[in-house]
Image: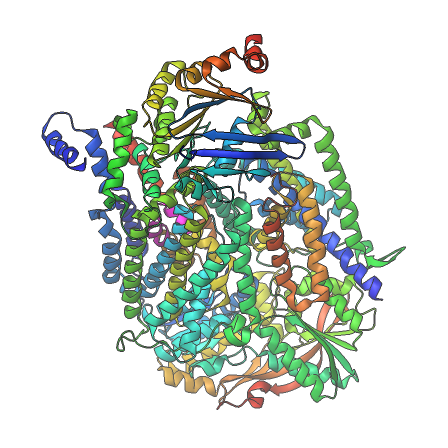
């Protein structure tokens, strides 16, 4: 009879024990950090978190007297509905002053509408889905959009005198963005797209797709995968099939070549040209300082990448806000501050927020992988200064 | 061109198939003989990959040595796991088996991420194995060639072993009819342990050899589970040859479909599985 | 012949030796009556509402997920169909409700019904094809059905929003004037009420003649064939009903979170719900009410204490449960009671 | 004369080279008490499976009360009163005795598909099931899970389940198989007490049981009907002695 009785009791007790309310510290700036610590982008999440934590570690001393920082980290497990629930709890229960983080565009897209309802500023430090800032007036993004990187590399490819291109991208929204951006850039530059493939998001094996590119013999191939282990897999296929030996140039955005993946991809990467907002090999005092701090904190093995720097800059912007307001600000004050914020010496060079779109304005670098004294380096060969997101200019908000 | 293109795609499919088979065959036998739903089988392949890559990258152990060591280590490690956790559930409720093995998958994933980070493990191949290899009929990726050669060798050894050796005879007997095997005095509990270890060792080999095809990450066991299950289901439970054909089918069909009709890449493999299972519910080689 | 025996029963009740026959008939005839303990889960839920107001979003998701697990219990625990594709129906329901709300019809309740119908239709059609097989083959076919739906949803990103998820859902206030607010009160009671109604229905079905014959099919298919039960039809009906329930639960999540993502069709979701159900105990109608809260609360706690490696602890919990509490929590409780009985 | 309760005409079944039923013409009248005997591998159980629709015949037709049921599925034949028991007990082990029987009764009364009405409200069905338990002398164990019963009791439950389907034709496949001789008497009594109008076919090679229960015996050899007649005749028949009793004597 009482089987279910005991059971339910167990569940109830478990709930009671587990849910004892979190204690609240006085006089603190609470930042809810939503990140994908587990799931298929855990690596990116780790890089981003390291960047954020590093900035806090380095600059906590600079905070105005009496202001404490409380980072409440939550794992969205790479799932939008979980991320949405966490945001809801962070806003409604923990009463955070700011939301920050988010790797995945779907999660950001799920969270953004809540920030409009809860009137909480939301600092996106990665999620690159191009339209996300339009989902809420309280979203501001310090990372990048794929149009920002895909369009310039398309232009650049055309400028190399390459006439034909073949695009091959992962079959989901980000991939579609990259494809569209490159295509626009390349065709604007007078080039012609002779083929476009999309491979399934969960795809262990790229050889067949690379073979298709090889058969088509374009001047340049634009290969795009989300910045994960797929980058290695696809570059292996490129190497195995001797795509470049067949005289096909390969370009992509930095997603194909996160710095920490470079040693794993190995020499296969030499000569690869990508567009991006950051590479560890950038020679800038700000970057040198950043990397020094990074090595101090995480040792020589850990390699920073654009996720780390985006996280770092997100924190920098938040710190500037706190300093400017002594840690006491309303949502509107925060947004007003963010909209006009400028980061003159980010590791990735000067950056700023575009007041109109609340999206990042930054240099986009064309980088080429070279071997410098036995070590692979992603060297900046051309700088396209202060690029605004082209998509928003092509598709103005109604 | 078209010929050599098609060739390299099929060739690659076969290489992929070898990896799939090495990993899946153990699963097929455990499911067939012990009737155990071992969703954690991929963990052993993952472990193999991790051990091998870290031996190579951290201590510079040459590939063949590292591979052998990985297989041996995983096989040994699997013995206590089978004794302490699995054996209690033999012949038990398959749902308990699901719960146990999924639990192991979670734990191993977290452990892997804790020890080696979320980044996938690089496989630094000796220079000879990079790039292409010129065979009579055209150029093929050298590593794929190695995969196929070593895979074929292993398969032959395995099959001969199962056919000829006493141990193999016992395994076949137990798969055919467990009661009978017990009644003729086969120590099945010991047999289970050894078979389990053998399957795990093979999975480790597959995981190691295939580290460049199926990248070694904490999510490995879960992300690739479907592929392994498809191979076992199509091949038919509890036999050695079925999974081989199934793996070839999956591997080759997968890569050729993606080559010919990329827009339907993922659909076709599922459709094929569905069709085969509707046609032969017990798989191509399953006993009716 | 009924009257005299029940009379005898009453007499027997007074007499020394109770008449086991009448007792049997009575025990059997009363089995579907409500017991006091069946109120507990609902009291617990209400208690949670007052004790942990900050956790309403989690609570709502738990309630919706309980419904999902309940749908799984109907096929797995009663019809004996081991499925790894239950997410197909969850997702179908979620997208149905989501698309309606995104294209101008945000009325929640009709949304639920539409979701139920869609999911049921998919369940019925796929069931017609796959339910003829059994064991691993069936498992794989359920899995493949879900996987194909997932691929389709990803391909049709123009409609579904693909990987970015479905945007712009406008869910209207419940009954015209209860907003689904940030604090999730409406959501909580909405989920609570829907779960309660569905639970009543499932309970009714499980105790019906149909439910009994399902149990028979689970226990011994050959026997049910031999007594002339249309096994395939029974299974199909159960599968369809379960699909409808899963669809409703998907719609609940979609409407209360205002979002639908591809993961709602994913294998992980099918697997997790199975795990939660097994943790609670399969085929006993209450496993869902115990396994789901345990799992989701544990996950929420672990992941806020240990954001990166929480799933190690979840895994450990699962392994311990199997080794020490086979048959889930309810199974453990059973054994404790038997053990206690022996000692008394 | 009345239609036969069960009739087969030229019923044949072969698996490749092996023929398990070879043009069997068989007729069972209402109220018959018939035994089907034959050496192991004579095709007795295959015959049951063909008649009940577990196996599709290669050729020939099957009639129940004159109606051709050859094309009908198992369930539909049960509805027409063609019921069997199994050589190895087929029950729901974790359900208790009365529930096993009630399942059958409800199925017959067409309540098995009722999604809404609680099974407990089908009072009449439960009462009927219980009456059958009393008839089988199982009343005391009504609430015990079948798995906990002695095998002999399980065989009785099996018969009770069959009776729950109100059979017109009842095929008992080795009803006392695997039961210690001490208990088999109880089973034989139960069978003797079955309603007279049921056409009964007992498949067995337990001679004591057969000669006690059957009024006519059909001998099946290699899927073919060798001879049919009253027990005395069969016992006397030289061919039967040769192929069957002879074989037994030889043991």
Height in image: A7 above or below A88?
above
Magenta residue span:
C275-293
Residue at the front extreme of this rendering: D1
Residue at the right extreme of this rendering: B136
Task: Provide the major secondary structure of the magenta segment.
Answer: helix
Left or right for C266, reference D93:
right
State which quadrant residue C93 falls in.
bottom left
State which quadrant residue D67 falls in.
top left
| Quadrant including the N terminus of chain A | top left
What residue appears at the point 59 percent right and 60 percent down from the top-left corner? A299
Of B6 and B285, nearer the camera is B285
Left or right for B195, reference C336:
right
State which quadrant residue D13 falls in.
top right
Residue B230: percent from left, percent from top: 61, 51
Is residue A95 visible in this depiction of the protein? Answer: no
What residue appears at the point 23 percent right and 46 percent down from the top-left corner? D121
What residue appears at the point 42 percent right and 34 percent down from the top-left corner? D5
Is residue C76 visible in this depiction of the protein? Answer: yes
Q: Is residue C281 magenta?
A: yes
Residue C82: percent from left, percent from top: 47, 48
Residue B88: percent from left, percent from top: 48, 33
Residue B108: percent from left, percent from top: 54, 48
């Amino acid at each position: 009879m009482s089987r279910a009785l005991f059971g339910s009791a167990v569940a109830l007790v478990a709930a009671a024990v587990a849910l004892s309310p979190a204690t609240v510290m006085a006089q603190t700036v609470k930042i809810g950090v939503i990140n994908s610590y587990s799931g298929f982008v855990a690596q990116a999440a780790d890089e981003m978190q390291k960047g954020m934590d590093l900035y806090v570690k380095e600059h906590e001393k600079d905070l105005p007297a009496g202001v404490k920082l409380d980072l409440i980290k939550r794992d969205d497990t790479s799932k939008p509905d979980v991320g949405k629930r966490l945001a809801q709890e962070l806003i409604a229960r923990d009463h955070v002053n700011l939301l920050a983080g988010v790797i995945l565009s779907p999660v950001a897209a799920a969270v953004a509408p809540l920030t409009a309802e809860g009137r909480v500023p939301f600092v996106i430090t990665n999620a690159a889905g191009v339209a996300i800032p339009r989902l809420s007036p309280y979203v501001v993004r310090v990372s990048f959009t794929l149009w920002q990187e895909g369009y310039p590399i398309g232009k650049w490819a055309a400028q190399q005198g390459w006439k034909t291109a073949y695009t091959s991208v992962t079959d989901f929204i980000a991939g579609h963005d990259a494809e569209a951006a490159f295509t626009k850039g390349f065709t604007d530059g007078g080039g012609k797209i002779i083929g476009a493939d999309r491979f399934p998001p969960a795809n262990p094996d790229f050889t067949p797709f690379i073979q298709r590119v090889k058969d088509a013999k374009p001047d340049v191939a634009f290969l795009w995968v989300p910045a994960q282990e797929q980058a290695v897999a696809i570059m292996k296929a490129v190497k195995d099939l001797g795509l470049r030996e067949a005289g096909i140039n390969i370009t992509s955005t930095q997603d194909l070549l996160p710095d920490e993946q470079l040693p794993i991809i190995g020499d296969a990467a030499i000569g690869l040209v990508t567009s991006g907002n950051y590479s560890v090999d950038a020679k800038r005092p700000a970057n040198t300082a950043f990397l020094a701090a990074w090595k101090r904190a995480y040792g020589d093995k850990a390699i920073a990448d654009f996720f780390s720097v985006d996280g770092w800059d997100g924190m920098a912007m938040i710190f500037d806000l706190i300093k400017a307001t002594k840690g006491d600000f309303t949502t509107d004050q925060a947004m007003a501050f963010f909209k006009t914020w400028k980061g003159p010496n980010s590791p990735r060079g000067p950056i700023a927020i575009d007041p109109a779109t609340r999206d990042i304005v930054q240099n986009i670098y064309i980088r080429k992988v070279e071997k410098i004294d036995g070590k692979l380096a992603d060297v900046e060969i051309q700088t396209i200064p202060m690029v605004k997101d082209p998509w928003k200019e092509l598709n103005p908000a109604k | 061109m078209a010929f050599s293109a098609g060739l390299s795609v099929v060739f690659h499919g076969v290489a992929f198939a070898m990896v799939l088979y090495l990993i899946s065959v153990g699963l097929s036998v455990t499911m067939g003989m012990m009737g155990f739903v071992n969703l954690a089988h991929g963990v052993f392949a993952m472990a193999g990959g991790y051990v091998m890559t870290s031996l190579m990258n951290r201590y510079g152990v040459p590939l063949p040595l590292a591979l052998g060591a990985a297989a041996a280590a995983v096989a040994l490690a699997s013995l206590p796991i089978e004794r302490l956790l699995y054996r209690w559930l033999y012949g038990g409720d398959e749902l308990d088996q699901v719960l146990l093995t999924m639990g192991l998958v979670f734990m191993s994933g977290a452990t892997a991420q804790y020890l080696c980070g979320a980044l996938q493990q690089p496989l630094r191949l000796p220079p000879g194995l990079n790039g292409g290899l010129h065979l009579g009929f055209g150029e093929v990726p050298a590593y794929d060639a190695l995969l196929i050669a070593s895979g074929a060798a292993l398969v032959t050894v395995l099959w001969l072993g199962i056919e000829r050796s006493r141990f193999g005879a016992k395994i076949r007997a137990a798969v055919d009819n467990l009661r009978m095997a017990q009644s003729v005095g086969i120590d099945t509990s010991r047999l289970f342990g050894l078979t389990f270890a053998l399957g795990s060792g093979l999975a480790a080999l597959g995981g190691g050899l295939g580290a460049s095809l199926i990248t070694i990450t904490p999510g490995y066991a879960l992300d690739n589970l479907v592929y392994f299950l498809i191979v076992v289901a199509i091949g038919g439970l509890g036999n050695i040859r079925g999974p081989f054909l199934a793996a070839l089918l999956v591997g080759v069909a997968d890569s050729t479909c993606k080559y010919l009709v990329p827009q339907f890449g993922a659909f076709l493999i599922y459709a094929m599985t569905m069709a085969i299972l509707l046609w032969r519910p017990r798989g191509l080689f399953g006993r009716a | 012949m009924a009257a005299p025996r029940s009379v005898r029963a009453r007499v027997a009740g007074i007499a020394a030796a109770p008449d086991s026959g009448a007792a049997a008939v009575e025990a059997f005839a009363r089995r579907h009556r409500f017991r006091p303990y069946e109120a507990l889960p609902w009291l617990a839920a209400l208690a949670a509402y007052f004790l942990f107001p900050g956790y309403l979003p989690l609570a709502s998701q738990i309630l919706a997920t309980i419904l999902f697990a309940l749908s799984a219990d109907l096929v797995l625990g009663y019809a004996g169909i081991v499925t790894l594709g239950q997410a197909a129906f969850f997702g179908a329901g979620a997208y149905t409700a989501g698309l309606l709300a995104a294209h101008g019809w945000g009325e929640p309740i009709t949304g639920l019904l539409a979701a139920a119908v869609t999911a049921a239709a998919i369940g019925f059609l796929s069931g017609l094809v796959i339910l003829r097989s059994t064991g691993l083959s069936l498992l794989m076919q359920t899995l493949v059905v879900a996987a194909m739906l997932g691929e389709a949803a990803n391909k049709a990103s123009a409609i579904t929003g693909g990987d970015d998820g479905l945007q712009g859902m406008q869910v209207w206030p419940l009954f015209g004037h209860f907003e689904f607010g940030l604090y999730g009160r409406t959501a909580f009671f909405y989920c609570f009420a829907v779960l309660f109604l569905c639970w009543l229905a499932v309970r009714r079905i499980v105790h019906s003649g149909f439910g009994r014959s399902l149990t028979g099919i689970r226990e011994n298919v050959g026997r049910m064939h031999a007594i002339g039960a249309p096994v395939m039809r029974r299974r199909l009906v159960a599968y369809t009903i379960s699909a409808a329930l899963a669809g409703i639960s998907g719609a609940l999540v979609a409407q209360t979170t205002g979002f639908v993502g591809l993961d709602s069709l994913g294998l992980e979701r099918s697997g997790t719900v199975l795990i939660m159900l097994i943790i609670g105990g399969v085929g006993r109608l209450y496993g869902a009410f115990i396994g789901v809260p345990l799992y989701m609360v544990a996950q929420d706690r672990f992941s806020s204490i240990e954001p990166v490696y929480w799933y190690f602890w979840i895994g450990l919990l699962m392994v311990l449960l199997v080794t020490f509490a086979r048959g889930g929590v309810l199974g453990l409780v059973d054994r404790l009671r038997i053990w206690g009985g022996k000692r008394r | 004369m009345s239609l036969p309760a069960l009739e087969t005409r030229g019923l044949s079944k072969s698996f490749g080279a092996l023929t398990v039923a070879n043009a069997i013409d068989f007729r069972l009248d209402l109220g018959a008490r018939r035994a089907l005997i034959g050496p192991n591998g004579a095709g007795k159980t295959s015959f049951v499976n063909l008649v009940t629709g577990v196996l599709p015949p290669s050729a020939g037709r099957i009639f129940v009360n004159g109606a051709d049921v050859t094309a009908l599925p198992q369930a539909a034949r049960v509805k027409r009163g063609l019921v069997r028991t199994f050589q190895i007990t087929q029950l729901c082990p974790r359900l208790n005795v009365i529930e096993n029987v009630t399942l059958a009764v409800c199925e017959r009364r067409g309540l098995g598909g009722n999604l809404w009405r609680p099974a407990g409200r089908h009072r009449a069905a439960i009462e009927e099931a219980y009456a059958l338990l009393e008839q089988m002398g199982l009343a005391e164990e009504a609430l015990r899970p079948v798995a906990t019963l002695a095998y002999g009791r399980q065989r009785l439950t099996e018969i009770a389940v069959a009776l729950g389907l109100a059979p017109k034709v009842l095929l008992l496949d080795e009803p006392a198989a695997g039961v210690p001789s001490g208990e088999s008497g109880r089973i034989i009594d139960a069978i003797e007490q079955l309603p007279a109008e049921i056409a009964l076919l007992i498949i067995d090679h337990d001679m004591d049981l057969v000669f006690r229960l059957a009024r006519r015996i059909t001998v099946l050899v290699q899927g073919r009907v060798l001879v049919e007649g009253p027990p005395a005749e069969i016992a006397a028949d030289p061919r039967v002695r040769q192929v069957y009793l002879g074989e037994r004597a030889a043991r």
